[in-house]
Image (cartoon, rainbow, N blue to C red):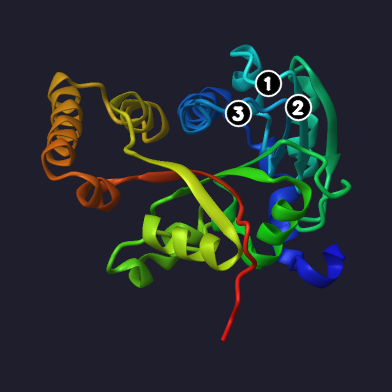
Amino acid sequence: MAEQIVSGNVKNAYDEFYNKHDEAWRMLGAKYKAQHIIDVCKGHDFKKILEVGAGDGSILKLLAEQNFAPEYHAVEISESGVEHIKARNIANLKSVQIFDGYRLPFEDNSFDLIILSHVLEHVEHERLLLRELKRVSAYSVIEVPRDYKADVDKRIKHFLAYGHINMYTPTSLRYLLRTEGFEIITDLTSMIEPEVTRFNTYVNQKKPKSLITDLKINAEYAIKKGLVSLMGTKKAEEMANAYTVLCKKADEQVKIF
């Protein structure tokens, strides 16, 4: 099935992806992704969790450390990612498997919750994967970056460098999920935290540390938060860098025409 659905160049790109590993950067990103999962799942008790596209296991590691659930499983398209997950010795991780990007190697309704964090933007046939999530679990947490801007078509090389082939806004993700038979229970928007911006500026981009730069980073974040506080949900979705939803299978099947 992998040969029929996942393009060869996509599979090859991810096979060795986690060999070029930056532990500090990935764990910093995972810190906030894991917290978003915890936040949208408040009030729910999920026992058996599957992360699809688990990457290097950084999110599962942080969830396990916070006792989010008693049992975890992971599937990942990248062989290097699977090796990183195994090496983490994540508490209560029961299985780690390679999968072909679409077909989940589990029976119907095998899990209480599926996590799909920053995966959908990489998927060539997103609706096929969403149908598999719905088959294997009644509930899913999905997070995507809010990449879409008016001039996104002028930045194709930039986004492809990150493997982002799909662009989302909160409204477009909701449309996709609802037309695939999901009901959204809880959602949240989030912006890049100053801690992450500083790391990216000083470590990834190797720019010299500066008090002025620090003040600018903090001021920009504070201004955005202030605008969101004043202007509400619409502004929050407009300024978001990521969008997270907890959703479940809808009671009624989607009808077309």
In three-dimensional space, the C-alpha distance between marks 1 and 2, rounded to whole angstroms, equals 7 Å
Q: Residue at x 50, y 26 (%)?
A: 42
Against 127, residue 50 (above or below) is above
Tell me, yes or no, if residue 163 can be seen here: no
Tell me, yes or no, if residue 255 can be seen here: yes
Sort mark 2 into few (<14), some (14-19) or many (20+) by Cα contacts within 10 Å.
many
Q: Residue at x 20, y 30 (%)?
A: 217
Q: Secondary structure at mark 3?
A: helix
Between circles 1 and 2, the one closer to the viewer is 1
Q: Residue at x 48, y 33 (%)?
A: 40
Amino acid type of the residue that numbered disc 2 sits on in the rendered structure? Tyr
Q: Secondary structure at mark 2?
A: strand
Instruction: Please state which of residues 188 and 117 is positioned toward the viewer in this rendering.
Output: 188
Q: Are marks 3 and 1 in contact (CB under 8 Å)?
A: no
Instruction: Please state which of residues 145 and 210 is positioned toward the viewer in this rendering.
Output: 145
The image's mark for residue 59 is 3
Report the quarter where the C terminus lies: bottom right
Against 177, residue 200 (above or below) is above
Q: Which residue is mark 1?
A: 69
In three-dimensional space, the C-alpha distance between marks 3 and 1, rounded to whole angstroms, equals 13 Å
Q: Which residue is mark 2?
A: 72
The image's mark for residue 224 is none
Q: Position of residue 41 (x, y in %)?
A: 53, 31
